[in-house]
Image (cartoon, coloured by chain):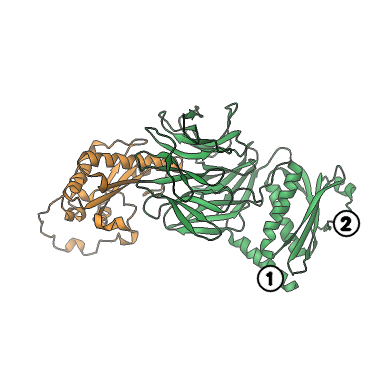
Chain colours: A orange, B green
Amino acid sequence: MRYAIVLFAALLLSACGSQPPAPEQNPAGVEDRTPHAATQPVPEAQPFDAFSIAGLKDPRSILSKRSVYFDYDAYVIKDEFRPLVEAHAKFLVSNPGFKVLIQGNADERGSREYNLALGQKRADAVKKALLLLGAHEDQIESVSLGKEKPVCTESTEECWAKNRRSDILHSAAHEF
Amino acid sequence: MKLRHLLGFLAVVATAAHAQLTVEITGAGANRMPIAIADFAGERIVSQALTSVVRADLERSGLFTLVDAAGQAQTDTAAVNFGDWKARGADALVVGSVGTAADGRYESRFRLYDIQKQASLGGQGFVHTTGQLRATAHRIADFVYEKLTGEPGIFATRIAYVVKSTGRFELQIADADGGNAQTALASREPIISPTWSPDGTKLAYVSFEAKKPVVYVHDLASGRRHVAANFKGSNSAPAWSPDGKRLAVVLTKDGNSQLYLLNADGSGVTRIATSAGIDTEPQFSPDGQAIYFTSDRGGSPQIYRIPAVGGEAQRITFEGNYNVTPRPSPDGKSLAYISRNSGRFQLTLMDLASKQTQILTDSAKDESPSFAPNGRMIIYATEIGNRGVLAAVSSDGRVKQRLSVQAADVREPSWGPLIK
């Protein structure tokens, strides 16, 4: 549970449907929409610092995105995920008291233990990028969930693509 | 007394119904020996509970056909009418009796006969409780199997496996026929890679309850467990050394997934091998001298062998571009593993001397093979109709069984050692 504390606006993320839900998300907490939502006044835009701690929870911040997706049998961070990784690196540099747990995942094809090692490579790829961008070794633990925690369970390429993923989970250092 | 026996029997039935793992025979050997298991003399209901398990064990092995012997209750001491059994087509015959011992427990005695030679091949007696009825039957079947095939029987051994139902993972242990299932550990997080200690008292496994893979060693009698490996990063793929003192594991504490040795209590970590890629799925050779493992050091996952003390790795598999999960046979002469063939993951057996390989299944999602301790059968996980099931196949590919649990996925089988 240590890492589940600062888990961003997962509710809003799943509501907009652009990202698969994180494995730690409690499905019971997803329902965020009320019948009157559309009639409520739109809150006035507040200025915010995208790289502050508040940014972790703010859906407008890039920090609220925390999944990096990979091609089949690949561990290279694709260009489209560079800004996301850079944002998390910047956050860690600005907030040395924070740590991240990076969980790598694999699709269902093949051996469980070999997939665990593949997931580790995906987690390590994100870890290495964060280190190169100035985060400290002590702030990062990269682990693998292999194919054991799929967010999608069908045997389709679309589903597999959602499972080939690294998730960045933040936690304040005092929670370790 | 009679009522107590009856209640005891009902308790056995209830246990069997609760144990959800069911076995289905889907293939049998070419030359099966006809054998008759006569009903044992004594209380009919207890005798039938016993002999039905003996018959099912021997039939499931795929090496025997059962000659109908119903209604022929015969004690182990009565004279055998060899001509009659020969006329029925039996080559072997088991007769026996179930009585009550002085202390109120059951006493089951049996004798095995060679019908052709008209000779006794020996017999045994067991004093047991109702709860030990199945175990006694498995031991009788083991005796018969060993006398007639020359190999140790594995009916009294146990298997460990993981059952996944909605939001729940259970590490279970059952008799080799799926009966008498018990849960060693229940968790909301995945459990993988269970493996028996060589003395059958412990299981090592990987649990994700700490949001990352951690290796535990679990003592089955006490239910107590301890962390064997929980380093920074991932900890996985435990494999016992044949003397039960050490574990080979995969750690990522120094970067990539790499092979390490440690004592079963978690102390004394040493690195076995160093590669730039993935090294995983270590498995000791039966003599403890070598470790088989999976590595992508050559560009695709292949199986390698390295001296257990460290040294130069030798590549074992060359066909195809995906060969994983090596499991040497108990005699060390062959290697079971999973190969990918046109996108299908299939259980494969290699003769290590000739390097000849044989695909043993026609399924597509085989995983986690584990040899029976006599080397005759290999249990593995596969998928049928989108559901995880366990299957077993003889090392010649002829005998096939399927073990499934209703409304749940079964996976990660590990066959336990011979019961001494």
Q: Residue at x 44, y 48 (%)?
A: B267
Amino acid type indicated by mark 2: Ala
Residue at mark 1: chain:
B
At label 1, the amino acid type is Leu
Q: Which mark is residue B362?
A: none
Structural crowding at the residue carrying mark 1, measured as other residues with C-alpha within 10 Å and reported as few (<14), some (14–19) or many (≥20): few
Asked whether, in this view, residue B348 is left or right of residue B313, the answer is right
Q: Nearer the viewer, mark 2 or mark 1?
A: 2
Residue sitting at x 48%, y 45%: B238
Query: Looking at the picture, does residue B341 appear above or below residue A9?
Result: above
Residue that carries the numbered disc 2 in the rendered image: B78
Specify whether residue A81 is in view.
Answer: no
Q: Position of residue A72 (x, y in %)?
A: 36, 36
Quadrant the N terminus of chain B occupies = bottom right
Distance between mark 2 and mark 1 Cα atoms = 30 Å
Let me know if residue A15 appears in the view.
yes
Residue drawn at (79%, 50%), measured in percent from left and top?
B36
B49 displayed left or right of A3: right
Other residues around mark 2 within 10 Å, as few (<14) / some (14–19) / many (≥20)? few
Residue A112 spot, x, y in % from top left: 45, 43
For marks 2 and 1 on the same chain, the one whose residue lies earlier in the sequence: 1
Instruction: Answer with left or right where residue B306 lies relative to residue A73.
Output: right
Nearer to the camera, B266 or A31: B266
Numbered disc 2: secondary structure: loop
Relative image position of residue A78 (x, y in whole percent) = 26, 36
Query: Disc 1 designates what residue?
Result: B7
Q: Mark 2 — on which chain does it sit?
A: B
Q: Nearer the viewer, residue B252 or B176?
A: B252
Q: Is residue B122 left or right of residue B260?
A: right
Closest to the observer, B76 or B234: B234
Image quadrant where residue B77 sits: bottom right
